[in-house]
Image (cartoon, grey):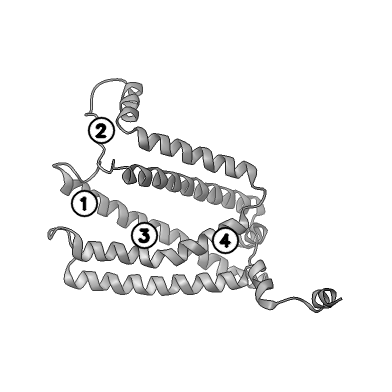
Amino acid sequence: NKGVGQDRQRHLQLARIDTGLGSLLTQGVMAAMLLTVAASSKQLGSVSTVHDLVVIFTSVLGNEFRAKMLLTFAIIGACMVAAIVQTLCAAWTFEQAMGRATATLPPESDESAVLRMVQNVRARPLFYVAYTVACAGAFTFTLLMDNAVDLSVWTEFCNGVLMPPVIFTLWYLAAFRLPPEYTLGICYRWIVFVVFLVCSLFCVGSIFDSLRLWPPMRDFLSGPTLSEATMSEG
């Protein structure tokens, strides 16, 4: 496990570099995608489906085939990363909840890769069982669900609502509960607090605004149509 051995300082430095570069890369890709769609969506008026994205990127790239290839790899890549992150987080959370937050791995050896894999599984059975169950559950859910759009919308809604308490809990722990050598500096902690607050406000505001435009919620807010009201009265 990173950060629990004698070389924790080196692991922490590498983790900071990894997090910084990853944040810049992912946010840069997201910003490029949003700006491209926003700048090119005037010809459509709204963007609701993947076909709308194909039209936009065809106009940007000048070729429909290249637009489809780009969107195909982008969507598949995003789904793969999301699947890996979600299943790993579920397995790690289960392992930590069962009291194995600092599972001891076997030392490095010159044995074959297969034997090292077997040793790792024996050292952390809870993690690998939970990861297998998470993958099997996701696969089964995908086969059984014909349309998971509604569930995805509610999942994103819950994710946006829960983000502020989660990140502010992490901020509180990092600012006041870590050992003195790891706590955030006085100036830095309040800069992070303001950044988190701004991001949380945008997140919650955009979630409720997007939910208002979701067809089932839009129908609910608009109430029954005249024909539906007439039929119900009749």
Q: CA distance from mark 4 to mark 1?
A: 37 Å
Residue 128, relative to residue 230: is it above or below?
above
Residue 173 image position (x, y, % from top left): 24, 62
Residue 224 image position (x, y, % from top left): 74, 76
Q: Determine the image quadrant of residue 51.
A: bottom right
Query: The C terminus appears in which quarter of the rendering?
Result: bottom right
Residue 95 image position (x, y, % from top left): 34, 42
Q: Which comes before the other along the chain, label 1 or label 3?
A: 1
Q: Which comes before the other along the chain, label 1 or label 2?
A: 1
Q: Is residue 196 visible?
A: yes
Q: CA distance from mark 1 to mark 2?
A: 22 Å
Which element carries disc 2, helix, strand or loop? loop
Give the crowd class for mark 2: few <14, some 14-19, many >=20 residues within 10 Å.
few
For image coordinates 23% across by 62% down, the residue present is: 174
**Residue beneath disc 2:** 105
The kind of residue tagged 4 is Val
Which element carries disc 3, helix, strand or loop? helix
The kind of residue tagged 1 is Gln
- Residue nearest the viewer, comparing 64 with 149: 149
Q: Is residue 39 visible?
A: no
Dot label at residue 153: 4
**Residue beneath disc 3:** 24
Q: CA distance from mark 1 to mark 3?
A: 17 Å
